[in-house]
Amino acid sequence: MIQSKSKIFQLDNRSRDVFKKIVEEYLAIGTPIGSKTISLMNDIDLSAASIRNIMHDLESLGLIYSPHISSGRIPTEGGLRLFVDAMLEIGNLTDIDQAVIKEQTISRNITVEDALTKASEMLSGLTNCAGVVSVNKDTKSIKHIEFVSLEKGKILVILVDQEGNVENRIVNNSERLTASSLATASNYLNHHMRGFTLQEAIQNIEMDLKYKENEIDKETASLLKQGLAVWSNSNYKKDDRILIVKGASKLIANIEATDDLERIRHLFQDLENKQEIMEVLGLAEKAEGVRIFIGSENKLFSLSGSSIIVAPYQNEKQQVVGVLGVIGPTRMNYGRIIPMVNYTAEMMKKILG
């Protein structure tokens, strides 16, 4: 990206204007742009011959190329990167777009997963790209935990999260535990776990037990450690993530040529590779705002020539819990989609608050 930005300083004002027109027209209509077309634009006071010379220089810099013999020029991936980093004019969201995003994301009486699905569908509908959302399963706060004695040597551990979802685990325990010991263990865990995610709670309790082990009887301490071990390997484990991709069918709406069809075929294959998509989204988790990958900048989308615009979103504790955005062709409306993804990420924080 730094290398692409440095190229902007190699362009004089006339070259910048011509390059910007080529990219903007390509993003708008999707066809190669010729020198005559640019010369007829109102704010370009250059002859077609002068524009051809400038286009030759831009091609030498690797910013534009001709996809067919005797055709106009379109931006390379490097050219798009330069445009996005140094020349893109990002617009404000319209009142209508803001209203749609708020309505779709700030819904009452729905689960986090349902809200994320709606967000993915909404982004797809507004951008005509595939909407993508990831979230750590360990985003739900714990509401209640309880130990129940079953048959000899078996303890049922019941965990309820903030949305009322219940998970049960059975702990094998050879210690003779009284009803009092089970109540003590339940009270201890509820005190330390309520309001925290499982991962946070486990870290808190493990630290607390190091310093208070002498204050807790042996049987209760043993049960607590076994319970933590069981839940550490449960479906709530932090490494488990949910990935939601919606609206992939929209990507085939504007296919006009055989090479477009081949590109879309590769993109659909990419979208099937959930693990690699998660790795791409993981790169955006540490970003402070929107992150953009254009074409072969990411190996997953190198064959399909696709771009991905994503942003991390946080919970009420300012912790990044997932990433959302869109996947689509490199010829997308970056100026409109970037603020849309950023605003949706801000709205997701209200859901997780």
Image (cartoon, grey):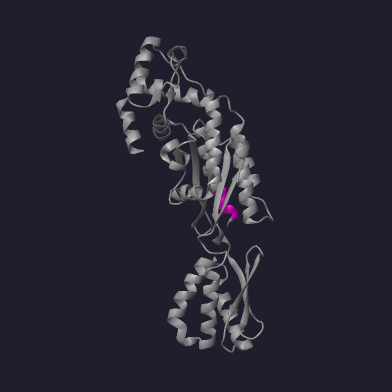
Q: Taking 190 as reference, is 347 above or below it?
A: above
In-front residue for pair 112/294: 294
Coordinates of residue 76 in the picture (x, y in percent): 41, 28
Q: Residue shown at 62%/45% (left/top)?
A: 102
**Residue 47 visible in the current orientation:** no
Q: Residue shown at 61%/35% (left/top)?
A: 250
Would residue 182 be counted in the magenta stretch? no
Quadrant of the image occupied by residue 13: top left
Coordinates of residue 199 in the picture (x, y in percent): 51, 66
Quarter of the rendering occupied by the C terminus: bottom right
How many numbered marks, from 0 up?
A: 0
Coordinates of residue 321 in the picture (x, y in percent): 51, 56
Would residue 348 be counted in the magenta stretch? yes
In-front residue for pair 97/134: 134
Q: Taking 26 as reference, is 217 above or below it?
A: below
Q: Residue shown at 46%/79% (left/top)?
A: 209
Coordinates of residue 92 in the picture (x, y in percent): 53, 35
Q: Which residues are magenta?
A: 346-351
Q: Taking 203 as reference, is 181 above or below it?
A: below
**Residue 179 visible in the current orientation:** yes
Q: Taking 278 as reference, is 264 above or below it?
A: above
Quarter of the rendering occupied by the N terminus: top left
Quadrant of the image occupied by residue 128: top right
Say whether residue 117 is left or right of residue 45.
right
Magenta residues: mostly which secondary structure? helix
Say whether residue 169 is left or right of residue 280.
right
Residue at the limit of the structure toward the right, as seen here: 109
